[in-house]
Structures are given as C-alpha cells and as structure tokens.
Amino acid sequence: MREGGWEMNITITLIVVLYMLMMLGIGYYSSKRISSNADFMVAGRRLGPLLMAGTLAATEIGGGGPLSVLLPTHMEIGE
C-alpha cells in the first residue's frame, strides 16, 4: 500500500458516512412534514418557481441521459 493510503480511506469513509447520516436526517425531517400521499406528490404545494424549475430540469436531464446513450447505439445497429 502506498504511503498515506489508509488516511485517505478513513477520510473518504467518514465523508460517505456523514453524507448518509445527513440524507437520513433530511428524510426524517421531511417525513414529519408530509401528512398524506397527495401531500408528498405535490410537495405540500410549497415549492417556489425557482425550485420547481430546478426539479423539472433535473427530471428532464435525468430522463434524457439514458436516451442520449441508447440512441447512437440504436442508430449504429439499425444501419
């Protein structure tokens, strides 16, 4: 093992564990603010226009990512 390798592993492990704990905390906090499935689906109607636009953009980008990989492959096979 190269010198200083174990310190890097500990640092990365701590960062991942802290990130996971933070995500669990946010999820727990959010779960207490949601009262029904309908409330969850519309985010309690509390999203502002900027956050709504960001959510829509993330959905479009996330959904389009796999298509941008698959389309060129499909086009090569179809030729």
Image (spheres, grey):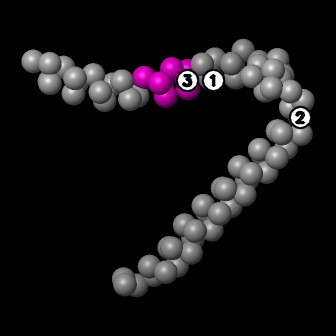
Residue 34 in the image: above or below residue 47? below
Contact between labelled residues 1 and 2, with CB atoms less than 8 Å apart: no
Neighbour class for label 3 at 10 Å: few (<14), some, many (≥20)?
few
Circle 2 residue: 33
Name the residue type under label 1: Thr
Circle 3 residue: 59
Quarter location, residue 78 = top left
Comes first in the chain, label 2 or label 1: 2
Between the C-alphas of marks 1 and 3, the distance is 6 Å
Residue 54 in the image: above or below residue 4? above
**Foreground: 54 or 73?**
73
Q: Is residue 69 magenta?
A: no
Contact between labelled residues 3 and 1, with CB atoms less than 8 Å apart: yes
Look at the numbered disc 1 and give the secondary structure of its residue.
helix
Neighbour class for label 2 at 10 Å: few (<14), some, many (≥20)?
few
Stretch of the chain drawn in magenta: 57-64
Q: Is residue 1 left or right of residue 57?
A: left
Q: Which mark is residue 55?
A: 1
Comes first in the chain, label 2 or label 3: 2
- Report the residue at 31% width, 29% height from top: 69
- Report the residue at 77% width, 44% height from top: 27
Q: Is residue 43 left or right of residue 65?
A: right
